[in-house]
């Protein structure tokens, strides 16, 4: 399986077309029988999870059986042409699922072919949560310190906050130098570990997912940072 994520920054004057695309682009994505799973999503300011929406950054996540199917979509689809036409900056990454636990919209989106494979080098992570309405205030009060700790953690490369809506369905995408640095943040960072503890105790989420990926290829920039990469 190939998992792809494109994050595009729209020009200020074209933001109405970004909102329009979130409705229109559902049709070609839904009709594409080769696309196994897809999500159109917004983001916070500078594409960060702990920031209020600025309505400039938008994302599309898709999954495919193979690279050939994605390449055809990337080159020819109305969806990617829409993002390209109105975007001023774009970042795309292709991922190979290494492990995945949990659900996204009641589905298991990432098929792991070799769950016991040994992976070295850079690693990407997607954590996604559907937040309970009555827990939103607590979640927002605590998520910022975990996000700040992540951006300051050794081995951290990049992060982006994405989600189907800016308040209740949120995901964090991050890239790390290796699995060890990612695990050190996840399990040894006080702020992150404390937030995870509160998540369990206070039952903030009605649905959640955690997935790790090897990086197949990436290109483009996010917030002016070039992160071109070929890892496999």
Image (tube, rainbow, N blue to C red):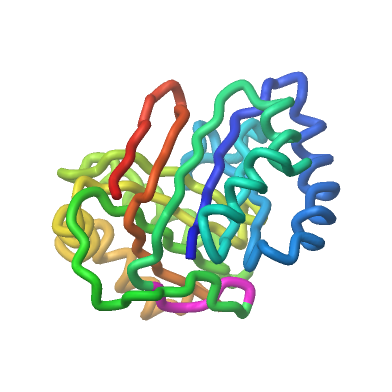
Residue 104 among those drawn in magenta: yes
> In this picture, which residue range is highlighted in magenta?
100-105
Which sits in the foreground, 119 or 17? 119
Residue 169 among those drawn in magenta: no
Residue 52 makes an appearance in the image: yes
Residue 189 makes an appearance in the image: no
**Residue 186 x, y percent position in the rendering:** 24, 62
The quarter of the picture where residue 195 lies is bottom left
Which sits in the foreground, 14 or 137? 14
**Residue 125 x, y percent position in the rendering:** 36, 57
**Residue 2 x, y percent position in the rendering:** 49, 59
Q: Which residue sits at x=81%, y=32%? A: 17
Does residue 111 appear left or right of residue 131 in this picture?
A: left
Q: Does residue 54 sit above or below 154 in this rendering?
A: above
The quarter of the picture where residue 69 lies is bottom right
Q: Which residue sits at x=56%, y=68%? A: 131
Does residue 39 appear left or right of residue 63 in this picture?
A: right
**Residue 218 x, y percent position in the rendering:** 41, 39
């Amino acid at each position: 399986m190939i998992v792809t994520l494109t994050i595009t920054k729209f020009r200020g004057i074209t933001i109405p077309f970004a909102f329009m695309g979130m409705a229109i682009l559902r049709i070609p994505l839904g009709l594409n029988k080769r696309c196994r799973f897809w999500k159109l999503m917004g983001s916070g300011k500078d594409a960060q999870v702990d920031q209020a929406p600025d309505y400039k950054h938008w994302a599309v996540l898709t999954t495919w059986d193979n690279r050939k199917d994605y390449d055809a979509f990337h080159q020819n689809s109305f969806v990617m042409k829409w993002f390209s036409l109105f975007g001023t900056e774009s970042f795309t990454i292709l991922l190979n699922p290494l492990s995945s636990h949990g659900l996204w919209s009641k589905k298991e989106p990432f098929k792991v072919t070799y769950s016991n494979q040994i992976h070295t080098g850079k690693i990407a992570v997607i954590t996604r949560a559907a937040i309970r309405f009555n827990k939103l205030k607590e979640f927002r009060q605590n998520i910022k310190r975990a996000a700040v700790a992540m951006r300051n953690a050794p081995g951290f490369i990049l992060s982006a906050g994405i989600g189907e809506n800016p308040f209740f369905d949120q995901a964090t995408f991050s890239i790390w130098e290796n699995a060890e640095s990612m695990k050190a943040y996840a399990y040894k960072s006080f702020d992150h570990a404390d937030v995870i503890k509160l998540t369990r105790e206070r039952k903030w989420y009605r649905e959640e997912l955690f997935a790790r990926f090897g990086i197949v290829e990436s290109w483009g920039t996010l917030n002016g940072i070039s992160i071109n990469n070929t890892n496999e």
